[in-house]
Amino acid sequence: MSYPGEPYEVLLQRMALFFETNTDGNKFVFPEMFGQGYFELVNLPMGIQALLCDFSIRDDYYFVRQKTDSEYYNLRFEIIQEKEQSQVLINDEVIENRPRQAYAFMNSSRYTLTYKVKKGMIAKSLNLRFSKHNIGAIIGSTAEDKLLACCVTNSIQHNKIIPVSAKMLELVMEILGIPENDPYRQLKIFNRSLFITEVFFASMHSSDYQLSENKILTNSDFYQIREIENIITSKLDQLPPKQEELATLAKMSLSKLKYTFKAIHGTSIYNYYQRARMEKALQFLQDGHTVSETVQELGFKDMTNFTRNFKRRFNIQPTKVRRFGNSSQQHQEKY
């Protein structure tokens, strides 16, 4: 499922469309045929949003959160149990490979996030959405290079994905357990959300997870790479400019461009372009475009080439992708 990287209301709306149901206010409940449990949005003071999740899944799903120019940061605490050993992947990186995991990380809306979940997964999670101003106030900086020193971007760096501590676990379970009819529920969630955020940053800067000062990538580097990213994804039906040309545009040496792009995005320029192309194709197909239209729009040489690349990326035939709101299509996306 592909969805815009906007406030959590948009995610709930897209999930309701995808699973052919409705939201109940700010709460999405899984239809029985797909799983059990819910995603609930709680709007907190200062413009902070909390997404509370407690669910189990009956099939495999691949979620793609599209990047956005609306700059915000998601802080995620997740506790996962699975019936069998399987993988949890974020942007193709294996986070853990065992029946029970509990981890925390932060990511930026400036970068696409892909997340694969497996059949039988049981998850409880707390997701907090902060504006750049909120995070800047918390860590004392609004410069992007400083912020990203504490965030997981498109490059999943394992020293920035930390185990959920006993205190974090206690706070997540306490927040999920506050009754909906509690007259002080919003206040309690707000209070504990700020506390768990403090615990997260304290853990990130402890002796065990101390991040070294970034002496290579500057704030200017981040903005230059963002411009290059915009160039190579602006026309996905065409090959991106040669790397030598991109290096000139970025005012970098070719070697620095390659290093900096991979440091930020976790992959090469060409691989990033191909990944963006496949994710755009998924979005097109979900929104009702035919396979032929998608092939033409994205400039693939032929149907066979597109189908092979799409299946390699998502482990599903493009003809099997579920269209939003179309009950005649397959009721599940299997990966």
Image (cartoon, rainbow, N blue to C red):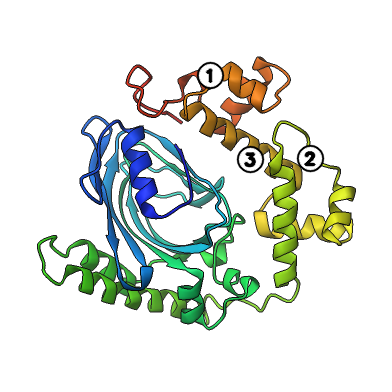
Q: Is residue 264 left or right of residue 319?
A: right
Alpha carbons under labels 3 and 1: distance apart? 19 Å
Q: Nearer the viewer, residue 47 or 211?
A: 47
Q: Specify whether residue 100 is in view.
A: no
Q: Residues within 10 Å of mark 3 (few under 14, many from 20)?
A: some
Residue sitting nearer the eye, 186 or 36: 186
Alpha carbon distance from label 3 to label 2: 12 Å
- Point 51% across, 26% down: residue: 285
**Among the two numbered marks 3 and 2 on one chain, the one whose residue lies closer to the N terminus:** 2
* Amino acid type, label 2: Pro
**Is the Cβ of the residue at disc 3 closer than 8 Å to that at disc 1?**
no
Rendered residue at 38%/40% (across/down): 14
What residue type is disc 3 on?
Ala
The structure residue drawn at horizontal position 84% and vertical position 51%, both measured from the top left corner, is: 246
Q: Determine whether the residue tagged by mark 2 lies in a helix, strand or loop.
A: loop
Q: Disc 1 designates what residue?
A: 290
How much space separates mark 1 and mark 2, taking CA atoms?
25 Å
Marks 1 and 2, the one that precedes in the sequence: 2
The answer to whether 163 is drawn above or below residue 30 in the figure is: below
Crowd class of label 2 (few under 14; some 14 to 19; many from 20; radius 10 Å):
many
Q: Can I make out residue 26 in this image?
A: yes
Q: Earlier in the sequence, mark 3 or mark 1?
A: 3
In the image: residue 224, left or right of residue 246:
left
Q: Amino acid at mark 1?
A: Thr
Asked if the residue at tag 2 contacts the one at tag 3, i.e. Cβ–Cβ closer than 8 Å, the answer is: no
**Residue 276 badge:** 3
* Callout in the foreground (3, 1): 1
Where is the N terminus found, in terms of image quarters?
A: top left
* Residue at mark 2: 240
> Total marks drawn?
3
